[in-house]
Image (cartoon, rainbow, N blue to C red):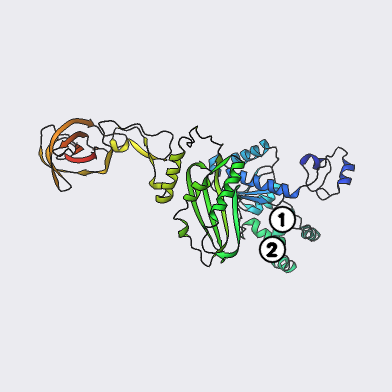
Amino acid sequence: MIHAANRAAEQAGARIGARAVDCRAICPALRIEPAEPDRDAARLARLAFWARRWGPYSTPDGDDGIVLDTTGAAHLFGGEAAMLAQIQAGFARAGLTAGLALAPTRGAAWALARLGPERAICTDPLPALAPLPVAGLRLSDETLLLLRRLGLRTIGDLAAIPRLSLMRRFARALPQDNPLVRLDQALGRAAEPLDAPEPEPEYSAEARLAEPVMDPSDWLPGLLEALCAQMAAADRGCRRLCLSVFRVDGERRDIRVAMAAPTRDPGHLLRLFDGRLERLDPGYGFDLIRLAAEAVEPLAQAQPGLDGAAPQGLALARLVDRLAARFGTAAISRPLPRESHVPERAETPGPPLAADPAPPARPDRPIRLLNPPEEIRVLYVIPEGPPAQFVWRRQTLRVARHAGPERIAPEWWHDRPGTRLRDYFRIEDDSGLRLWIYREGLVHDGRGGTPRWYLHGIFA
């Protein structure tokens, strides 16, 4: 029997459901390949996930279709018509012929893609579906034959019939084979949720337990060994792991750990779960433990040095992973340079293993900056110089030495109008404490009253 046929075979006389011998008698040049429904379904599932570049949710639709939710995404591709053209071109580059349609409902899109015009765009389902045959409602062959015998050949004919008589006629029909239910779904009168499952992880390991347990610690090392062996065979490393426990009451609990660099070292990955397994709520116990690699990247084998040392940078990456697992990813960062003369804007936090680290600090800049700068109370000021004595944190400090001033003007493209300039001084008190202070504004700058003094940094 013919399971599937391309457009050329259909034009030559091949029909799905017909005998292959009869079709070959009509077209001797017909090429026949053995059907592989399982492999076709797997390819269609992969193709549905590939199509998510045009929308967040997608799922296979039958044996030869994909339903894709593009709500709010058309403007990213230049509009609905441009998006459909781009989708069709993408399938063509993959060697596939696709019939496309865009509609407010799943049922309307299904009918227009198979029975409507090329790349149809529908805003009102009823006028667009009315001239199409009733086969566009996704009904069985028996129901379609019955509708044709009743003289209902188009969707418009079916919509014009009083619902009461049709309800009596199809009262015992299944919902997926009831013409009224399918019509309501196509017109948007009845909901038809889209079940879009996430793809199965490419690398995973699981342990099925005969009896419920309360702690997965005993099984975690073995799962990590099995998972890392799978990734090592494919020269892959993971950037994120998810440990899932399935409780006997049907609930699921997940713990995720992230890595700064791809790795497949079981010992290192095991340490990242320290102190986190206690946060699991086992309930009445769980009988299935699954470990999956959610973010996988290529990772070739690294040869150690002649002295047996690990590759350069590996120790730093593992240290970052342990710190992030203990304190959270937001607590670990690396300063990156940013173009600005204002000290607090000259650096910005970045990833801990950023490829462009901040340059060495200037020798006249303190290592530690106070955020925000702390105001100091000046007791005596040297003209055009630093204060001779000031109070900071209830301590009276006397200036023994100073250097400066270094003037930093406000950035007019960033600061508000009226922002005052700063004059920075490097000072040292009698005890050797070296500080970085600045005067905000001048006496006659017209941008405020008396200048104010702040302590901004502390030298090592």
| Along the line of sight, the residue nearer the viewer: 8 or 375 | 375
Q: Is residue 279 left or right of residue 428?
A: right
| Residue farthest toward the right in the current orientation of the protein | 25
Looking at the picture, how far across and down is residue 377, in whole percent?
Answer: 14, 44
Residue under circle 1? 138
Is any part of residue 78 visible from this angle?
no
Residue designated by label 2 = 175
Marks 1 and 2 sit apart, C-alpha to C-alpha, by: 11 Å
Quadrant containing the C terminus in the rendered view: top left
Q: Secondary structure at mark 2?
A: helix
Q: Is residue 187 placed above or below 332 in the rendered structure? A: below
Residue 319 in percent (x, y) is at 42, 43
Query: Residue 136: percent from the left, percent from the top?
Result: 72, 53
Q: Along the line of sight, which residue is nearer the eye, 51 or 179?
A: 51
Give the answer, above or below, for where 96 lies relative to 201.
above
What amino acid is labelled 2 in the image? Pro
Q: On residue 167, which mark appears?
A: none
Residue type for callout 1 = Arg
Tag 1–tag 2 contact (CB < 8 Å): no
Mark 2, Cα crowd under 10 Å, few <14 / some 14-19 / many 20+, is few
Q: Secondary structure at mark 1?
A: loop
Q: Is residue 8 visible?
A: yes
Crowding around mark 1 (Cα neighbors within 10 Å: few <14, some 14 to 19, many 20+) is some
